[in-house]
Amino acid sequence: IQTTENKAEIVSIAHFLSMPMVRIPEYQRPYKWEEKNVVQLIEDIFFFRHQNGYRFGTIVIHVNELNENNQKVVYNDIVDGQQRYTTLRLLIYALHQLVNRSNKFQTSTIVLLNELKTKLDAIDLNYKTKSSIENIHRNYQLIKRSVQHFDDETIFNFIQKFEVVIFYIHDITEAFQF
């Protein structure tokens, strides 16, 4: 009998990308975002940079409780939104590189990105298909070129004020009802 109820919450990009124990289950489709999806995301960030609470959409997470070595381990398995999650990670890596290779950014922006990158580095993304790896590489290069005009305010607002809606489910069969 499942005693934990499903819930939804609205969280910042920083909160979402800082979640521990995130996995993208192997049954998920490969990473397929195309250039047009990435360009639209970056354009949205820049266009809505002065708006509080811009929402990037919905993420569905299966709170997956497993018993590993006689210990309960809870994974946050992304069952819907893995394309967005992966692209947001690429964006953080590109912004991290941008701010650490330039002297035009405030210390607070550098610290924010360094902390977020450290949290992301602790979570492996195991995309195995050739197409996923190629798309990740291609989109990362595109993102690096596309964020050159971002400033402190744009980066801060994107990370701290932009949001996603997360639905937490405890029964994997419910993931397919969204």
Image (spheres, rainbow, N blue to C red):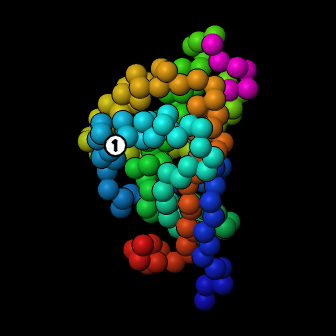
Quarter location, residue 133 = top left
As drawn, the residue found furthest toward the left would be 131
Q: Secondary structure at mark 1?
A: helix
Residue pictured at 61% horizontal, 50% vertical? 53
| Residue 17 visible in this rendered orientation of the protein | no
Residue located 41% across and 29% down the image? 143
Residue 86: tell me if it is visible. yes
Measuring from the top left, give residue 159's x and y in whole percent. Answer: 61, 40
Place of residue 103 in the rendered image (x, y in percent of width and height, measured from the top left):
63, 10
Q: Nearer the viewer, residue 104 or 61?
A: 104
Quarter of the image for residue 137 reads top left
Examine the rendered structure and indicate whether residue 157 appears above or below residue 103: below
**Is 174 drawn above or below residue 99 in the view shown?**
below
The C terminus appears in which quarter of the rendering? bottom left
Q: Residue at x 55, y 67 (%)?
A: 167
Above or below for 5 versus 9: below
- The answer to whether 80 appears left or right of 106 in the picture is left
Question: Which sits in the foreground, 129 or 106?
Answer: 106
Percent position of residue 160, x then y: 66, 42
Q: Which residues are magenta?
A: 104-109
Residue 107 inside the magenta-drawn segment:
yes
The residue type indicated by label 1 comes to: Asn
Pick out the residue farthest to the bottom.
1
Other residues around mark 1 within 10 Å, as few (<14) / some (14–19) / many (≥20): some
Which residue is labeled 1 in the image?
37
Indicate the position of residue 98 as horizontal and vertical percent values.
Answer: 54, 20
Front residue of 94/73: it is: 94
